[in-house]
Amino acid sequence: MSRNRGRRLGAFVFLSPGLTYLLVLLLVPLALVMSNTVFQRGRFGGVVYEFTTENFARLIDPLYLGVVVNSLKIAALTTLLALLVGYPTAYLIARLPRKWKTVALVAIVLPFWTNFIIRVYAWIILLNGPGLLNSGLKVFGLGPLELLYNEGAIVAGLLYSYLPLMVLPLFATIEKLDPQLREASANLGASAFTTFRKVTLPLTVPGVLTGSLFVFVPSFGNFVIPEMLGGSKSIMVGNLIRQQFLSARDWPFGSTLALALIAVLIVLLIAQSWVARRA
């Protein structure tokens, strides 16, 4: 009995920092956000503790629903582009000699070593009117183009920021593949494309799902990139939540939007887990 108690005490000591972190910085704020959803906004902002369901009814308002749909569209497009770029990149890195794999992976992760805001400002310098891209286009008589403050700029910024989150899970999955499976497929007369479609791709579905989730989730809730690269022309759900808390001071509705965002992400996690098990 004393030995079991010692083990339980030791496990509790090791788990207590993580449990405290989850309790103080996750569960308690989440409980506060959830509680605010059923109260009213004060006359001058803040929260008035009078029960209401109006905040949930406002979620289906065409104005706010359009913002959510637009956010889903931009996040889905970013995820699709990240997959189209990230899959061949991860595949090529996995086929490199061992000494070059480390160099390639460092090059992929290198942008994360730079401040996030600085990286976004770099895109402003590239895309603005007198920027580098428009200056290059003028040489061929094609500029200047409106490359900044639109959805295309938002997608470019999100893709650049989160592409490593697609490449790394795909690389880990592809590298674990048994090369003899591809060799067996080739020996049986399958073409390279058939081998990829029937052998490589099905076996890398878990990496595809994980990478897609890693890109979609932060893209869907991001508010820094849409605000800096999209301007006032494009607004995403992250910007809307920020405005409700800081500008409109409508904390109850902002909490409702945040709760809806969390619900969407939970549904995506459940769907990803279900598809992974089926795969």
Image (tube, rainbow, N blue to C red):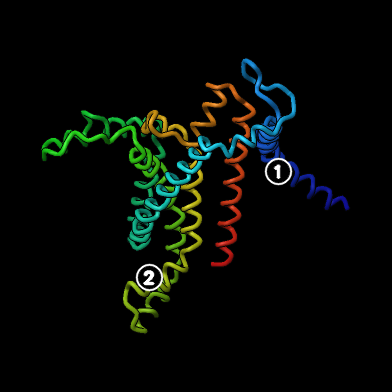
Q: Which mark is residue 103?
A: none
Q: Nearer the viewer, mark 2 or mark 1?
A: 2
Query: What residue did someone put label 1 on?
Result: 15
Q: Give the left or right position of residue 187, taking residue 262 as reference.
A: left
Q: Amino acid at mark 2?
A: Phe
Say few, some or many: other residues with alpha carbon within 10 Å of mark 1 (under 14 / 14 to 19 / 20 or more): few
Which residue type does callout 1 highlight?
Leu
Residue pictured at 58% horizontal, 56% vertical? 271
* Residue at the spot 64% in from the left edge and 32% down from the top edge: 55
What is the quadrant of residue 182 in the picture?
bottom left
Task: Look at mark 2 in the image and give the residue it sits on.
Answer: 196
Q: Nearer the viewer, residue 239 or 170?
A: 239
Q: Estimate the x, y position of residue 164 in percent, counting from the top left.
A: 41, 47
- Within 10 angstroms of label 2, few (less than 14), some, or many (20 or more) residues? some
| Residue at x 42%, y 73% (from the top left corner) | 198
Taking the image as shown, residue 263 lies to the left or right of residue 71, namely right
What count of labels does the image hold? 2
Nearer to us in this view, 107 or 37: 37
Q: Secondary structure at mark 2?
A: helix
* Mark-to-mark CA distance, 2 and 1: 43 Å
Position of residue 82 in the picture relative to residue 253 (left or right): left
**Position in image of residue 142 (x %, y %):** 15, 39
> Against 85, is 47 above or below?
above
Looking at the image, the residue that sits furthest to the right is 1
Q: In this rendering, does residue 219 appear at all?
A: no
Q: Residue 51: image x %, image y %?
A: 74, 29
Residue 189 location, quadrant:
bottom left
Q: Quick one: which residue is furthest to the front in this view?
A: 62
**In front: 103, or 25?**
25
Q: Using the image as rendered, state which of residue 115 and residue 272 is in the foreground.
A: 272
